[in-house]
Image (cartoon, grey):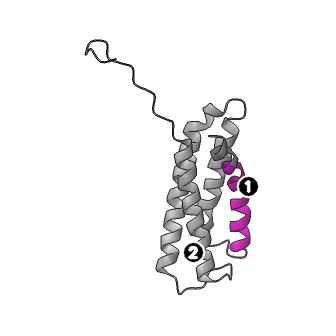
């Protein structure tokens, strides 16, 4: 949970900066960058919710990482489909795909880390099993 929270803070701060730089001058195409700002806001809120007790941030981390994973998944495969097109950042398509693929794996990993561990089941005293 601690790693998921720390990564939420890091990604929540970095994502809007990267997306603003990447799409500088393309503000009229707001649907293309607004999702990154929503993800950053959700991640920062999830981190903030657990300031005093990290366990309180678990449901918010799960929601934030779930949203971020879905967004990154669509971004990665959308870019893969349009691979010949030039990215607004000017970076090569392989680099952008690698970066987005890393984001997909990072979001999925942090989602799994935020998932609660199953509670051990209690023995059923009526079935005779201990």
Q: Which of these two is toward me, 37 or 71?
A: 71
Any mark on residue 57, and which?
none
- Main secondary structure along the magenta-highlighted residues: helix
Determine whether, in the image, residue 114 is placed left or right of residue 52: left
Q: Point out the stretch of residues depicted in magenta.
A: 7-31
Q: Residues within 10 Å of mark 1 (few under 14, many from 20)?
A: some
Seen at 58% across and 68% down, the residue is 100
| Lateral position of residue 116 relative to residue 15, left or right | left
- Name the residue: 63% across, 46% down: 4
- 68 on left or right of 45: left
* Residue annotated with mark 1: 13
The part of the image, by quadrant, that contains residue 122 is top left
The residue shown at (64%, 48%) is 43
Image coordinates of residue 59 in percent, x first then y, are 55, 38
What is the residue that sits farthest to the top in this orientation? 126
Look at the picture and state if 98 lies above or below 125. Answer: below
Which residue is painted at 63% across and 78% down in the image?
95
Residue 75 in sight: yes
State if disc 2 and disc 1 touch (CB < 8 Å): no
Give the residue at mark 2. Answer: 97
Would residue 69 be counted in the magenta stretch? no
């Amino acid at each position: 949970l601690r790693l998921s929270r720390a990564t939420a803070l890091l990604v929540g701060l970095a994502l809007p900066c990267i997306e603003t730089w990447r799409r500088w001058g393309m503000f009229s195409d707001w649907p293309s960058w607004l999702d990154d700002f929503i993800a950053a806001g959700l991640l920062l809120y999830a981190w903030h919710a657990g300031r005093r007790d990290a366990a309180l941030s678990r449901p918010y981390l799960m929601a934030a990482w779930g949203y971020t994973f879905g967004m990154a998944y669509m971004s990665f495969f959308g870019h893969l489909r349009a691979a010949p097109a030039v990215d607004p950042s000017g970076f090569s398509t392989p680099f952008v795909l690698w970066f987005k693929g890393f984001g997909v794996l990072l979001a999925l990993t942090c989602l799994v880390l935020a998932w609660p561990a199953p509670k051990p089941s209690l023995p059923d005293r009526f079935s005779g099993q201990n």
